[in-house]
Amino acid sequence: MSVTIYLPKDAAALALGADEVAAELTRLARAAGQDLNLVRTGSRGLFWLEPMIEVATPGGRIAYGPVEASDVEGLVAAGLFEGGAHPLRLGAPAAIPFLARQTRLTFARTGIVDPASVEDYRAHGGWAGLERALELGPEGIVEEVVQSGLRGRGGAGFPTGVKWRTVAAARAPQKYIVCNADEGDSGTYADRMIMEGDPFVLIEGMVIAGIAVGASRGYVYLRSEYPHAAAAFALALDAARRAGLLGARIGGSAHDFDIELRMGAGAYVCGEETALLDSIEGKRGQVRAKPPLPAHQGLFGRPTVINNVISLASVPFILAEGAGAYRDFGMGRSRGTMPIQLAGNVRFGGLYETGFGVTLGELVDEIGGGTASGRPVRAVQVGGPLGAYFPRALFDTPFDYEAFAAAGGLIGHGGVVVFDDTVDLRAQARFAMEFCAIESCGKCTPCRIGSTRGVEVIDRIGAGDAKQITLLRDLCETMKFGSLCALGGFAPYPVLSALDHFPEDFGPEDFGAGAAGSAAAAE
């Protein structure tokens, strides 16, 4: 009798020895005369349990983890193939508390399906959104996405449906759908997990977007640091073409759409949408001045929808289940769910999809379990390397675009990086300026020069010159409002939040904090 075992080939699981576990499983099954169907999936996002293997039993899947190659022989002897008892046995995956508390809409299939199988994707509800989209037609699709309240998950939070409506209304012989998969923020990995674990949901979302706005061609711009995602997505593209879900007459309809995968070369600024367009066009990735907006003159000068991976991967659920089913989750103007990525010095790091509104304290203390080091949490950076640092006093902030903006931060791509009480926030502020100086495309002066001067000013503060704090705040304001794009415009967020919430790291107590501290320092 055959046994089916699911084992991730997600990059995180591979880094922890998943291939070695697969080889040992195969060897021992062969030695025992056991027919083994080993399915390589994506990860469910519980990284402290990876590699986590799941065995199909008559009562459902049974999980074991974290499994090392040296554990496999003992697992097999304990009855792994029947879901037998063992110290690494976790039980039903869906009952693991980290998963049981989540609301998985976008990541509903990640870690469950075979990412190379069109049929497995369909068996788990895939392509239902495309089928309804073909029934609704372009105008109906756009209206459904508008009504869902979906906002861009790449960081800007712009309403996705409004962007689609603008491109749909533009008149041009050629339009494009561009997917921004240049996931460069520290502590983020949601895009990678989707492309490795459920690539068809991204393909389906892009096809729906193409039908909605009248585009026949799409591009996925992927960072070169994600070779496993590139391989998994390329396999999925080929499978979708063979199934008639990409190319001419999608699904037997009158619509044509195909996707090309383009690899970036590692420049952080190419995550900015206009620099990304330049890079696809074969130019050096530099930020473009706006207007014109890409929705009017984007890729090759044509109307272009640019969305993040998660934004596009959210669309199939919205079309399949209806705008209301998505809009029912969330709070205020932040509707639906957000895949939050817990990273840094945290006990339970991983992907946690939930409706907007969960507080920062719940994420760090209850879901993340505090620090991995066991020391007190001192700061949390949200929104990538250019996100603000939050102290424990702000842990009641709900995860919501407007609430984070009111607290002086941004949710960005949903990355949450935890630091314990050994962190030096002046060093972190210096890193933000240094990072910006290295990654700046050089087109605008506030970003190119301001970031370099920022490093120098922070060094002088570290040497004991309190008056430099006023200069640093002025410099941050200039960069914030004078930079051409978010790289220079957001670099001040970690610096100002470190100054406001952790002034003791910048010098003696009489350096002061916030505006009052700045004024005192100036005197």
Image (cartoon, rainbow, N blue to C red):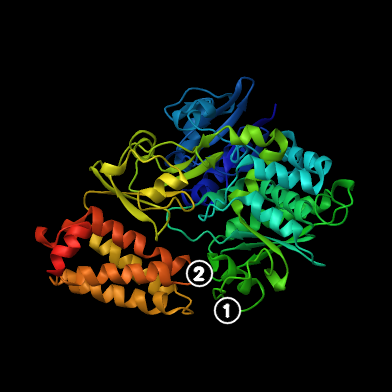
Query: For this view, does 173 lie left or right of residue 263?
Result: right
Under circle 1, the secondary element is loop
Residue 171, quarter of picture = bottom right
Q: Position of residue 472 (x, y in %)?
A: 26, 70
Under circle 2, the secondary element is helix
Residue at which label 1 appears: 284
Residue 350, quarter of picture = top left
Above or below, 320 against 294 in this view is: above
Circle 1 residues within 10 Å: few <14, some 14–19, many ≥20: some
Quarter of the image containing the C terminus? bottom left
Query: For this view, does 298 lie left or right of residue 369?
Result: right
Q: CA distance from mark 1 to mark 2?
A: 11 Å
Residue 180 or 140: which is nearer the viewer? Answer: 140
Query: For this view, does 359 lie left or right of residue 160?
Result: left
Mark 1 or 2, nearer chain start: 2
Query: Which of the numbered marks, if any, corresponds to residue 493?
Result: none
Which amino acid type is marked by label 1? Arg
Circle 2 residues within 10 Å: few <14, some 14–19, many ≥20: many
Residue at which label 2 appears: 269
Verify CB contact (< 8 Å) between mark 1 and mark 2.
no
Q: Position of residue 53 (x, y in %)?
A: 54, 36
Q: Position of residue 152 (x, y in %)?
A: 57, 52
Say which residue appears at 75% left-offset and 56% top-offset: 168
Say which residue appears at 81% left-offset and 41% top-offset: 136
Residue 483, quarter of picture = bottom left
Say which residue appears at 57% left-offset and 37% top-offset: 28
Above or below, 81 against 283 in this view is: above
Residue 163 or 217: which is nearer the viewer? Answer: 163
Quarter of the image containing the N terminus? top right
Residue 203 or 197: which is nearer the viewer? Answer: 203
Please indicate, yes or no, whether residue 125 appears anywhere in the rendered image.
no
Which amino acid type is marked by label 2? Val
